[in-house]
Image (cartoon, rainbow, N blue to C red):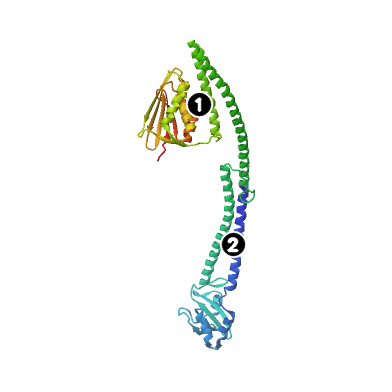
Amino acid sequence: MKNIVKRYIKITVFIVSLLIIINSIFIKQWTNTMERKDPQRIRQLIDGINIDKKFCTVSNKSKQYINENDQWMMVLSKDGSLVYSYKLPKKLKKNYELGELIDYSKWYIEDYPIEMMNVPGGLVVLGNAPHSIWKVNLSIEMKDMRMMLVRLVFFNILITVVLSYLMSLLFMKELNTVVSGILDVSQEEETRLEEKGYLKDIKIAINKVSQRLNDQKRIIKETNAMKEEWLAGVTHDIRTPLSVIVGKSEELQNIENDNEKKQMLETIKNQSFKITFLVNDLNLINKLDSHQFILTPQPLDLCKLIRECIADVMNIYASNKYDFVFDQNTKHGKIYIEGDAHLLKRAFHNILINSIVHNEQGCCISIKVKEELDDVIITFSDNGVGMSEEKIKSINNGKQNINEVHGWGSVVVKRIIGLHSGTTEFRNNNGMEVNMTLPKKLG
C-alpha cells in the first residue's frame, strides 16, 4: 500500500510540474505576441501627423490606422490645448493641463484607455473604447485577454485529462493483472505474477496465497490418495471373510435342528449382511468423493426398479417379521426417469435395509410412488422405532454423524439422489419416513 501512495504522489507532482511548465511557456509566448501595434505602422501614423504652431494636418494613412483599430485620436500642442481631433468622444475635454497629462500618460482619460506619443510640436493621444483594454503594466485588449484565458483553461483541462487517461491505462493494466491473479486463485489455479509495478505489494501477497493453496492442494491430494488406497484395501479384505461367514451361517442353518441355534445363526447372518452393506457404502462414498464413479444415465421404469429392490431385500432377509406394501399411483401405468440404475437401486436398498436392521422386532415397510407434472415423489415409510428429532435435523442439514444410526446409509442416499437432480427429506411419522423427489423423463 505504501508503494501505491508513493506512486500517486510522484504522478501528482509530475502532472502539476508539467502544467506549470506548459502554462509558463504559453504565457511567455502569448505576451511576446500580444503587442497590438505594429511598430512600423505606428511610425507611419506619427509621420503622417504634422503640427505647425496651432494647425495640424493628418494623412489618410494615419486615419486609416485609427479606423482599423477602432480608436480615436486627439493632437495636443505643447501647452495642452487641442489642435486636432478625430472621432473624439464628446464627453472628453478639449484642453488639458500638464499635470493631468502626466497622470493620464500610462492609464486612462476618464474610462478610455489611452496611449500617448510625442511628435514634433506636440502630443498625440490615441484612445480606445471603454473596457476594451485592460491596462496594468501591459496594454491587453479584452477580447485577447478572454481568448487567452479560454485557451489556458482549455489546454490545462486537455493536458490533465490526457495525462490522467494515460495514467489510468497504466493503472488498469496493473489492476487487470491483479484481478486475473485473484480469479485464478479463487478457481484454485496456480498463478505467478511479476512482482513489480504500482501494485507490487498486492502481487506479492497473491503469489504467497497461491503458493500456500498449491501446497495445501498437494498435501490434500497425497492424503486422499493414501486414504483411497487404504479404504480400497480394507473394504476388499473385509468382504472376503464376511462372505465366508454368511455362507457358513446359511450352511449351519440348513443342518441345524435346534430352533434357538438357528435363530442365533440368523442373527449372525443378518449382522454380517449389515457389515457388508456398511463396507459397500463406505467404498461407494469414497468413490463419489474422489469422482471415480462415472454416472451412466438411461431411461428407467421406476416402478419396476423399486419392485426389483424389494425382491432383493426380501431374498436377503427372508423373515416373516417384515411386510412390504407397494402403492403405485400413476396415470399411464409406467413412470420413466433418467438415471443410473446401479446407483438408484443402491439408494433404495439402503432405505429398505435401514428399516429392517433398525427394527429387529419387525415392522411394515411401505413404498408409495406418486406421479406429478414434472416430478415423481417416492415415499418410503415404516412403523418402527424411528429416530430422534435431533438426528433427523442433522441428517436433513447434511451434518449427520456417520457413527450414528442411519449414518452411512443416509449419506449415500442423499448423495445419489442429489446426483440425479433430486431431493431427499427424512422425518418421523409414526416411524421412519423418507420422501424423495426425482425429475421425470419427458418426451
Spot the residue most to the left.
331
Placement of 330 over or under 195, stated as above or below: above
Front in this rendered view, residue 136 or 314: 314
Spot the residue most to the right.
195
Q: Position of residue 418 (x, y in %)?
A: 47, 34
The structure residue drawn at horizontal position 49% and vertical position 16%, both measured from the top left corner, is 266
For disc 2, the marked residue is 19
For disc 1, the marked residue is 407
The disc at residue 424 is none
Q: Quadrant of the C terminus?
A: top left
Return the disc, 1 or 2, that comes first in the chain's sequence.
Answer: 2
Q: Is residue 194 left or right of residue 340?
A: right
Placement of 380 over or under 22, stated as above or below: above
Placement of 314 over or under 343, stated as above or below: above
Figure quadrant of residue 207: top right
The structure residue drawn at horizontal position 44% and vertical position 25%, both measured from the top left corner, is 311
Helix, strand or loop at disc 2?
helix
Figure quadrant of residue 48: bottom right
Disc 1 residue crowd, few under 14, some 14–19, many 20+, Cα 10 Å = some
Disc nearest the viewer among 1 and 2: 1
Q: Position of residue 201 (x, y in %)?
A: 62, 46
Disc 2 residue crowd, few under 14, some 14–19, many 20+, Cα 10 Å = some
Residue type pointed to by label 1: Gly
Q: Is residue 141 left or right of residue 229?
A: left
Q: Position of residue 281 (x, y in %)?
A: 52, 28
Q: Position of residue 5 (x, y in %)?
A: 60, 50
Spot the residue most to the front.
255
The structure residue drawn at horizontal position 59% and vertical position 80%, both measured from the top left corner, is 39
* Structural distance between the alpha carbons of marks 1 and 2: 74 Å
Residue 81 at least partly seen: no
Residue type pointed to by label 2: Leu
Front in this rendered view, residue 148 or 52: 148
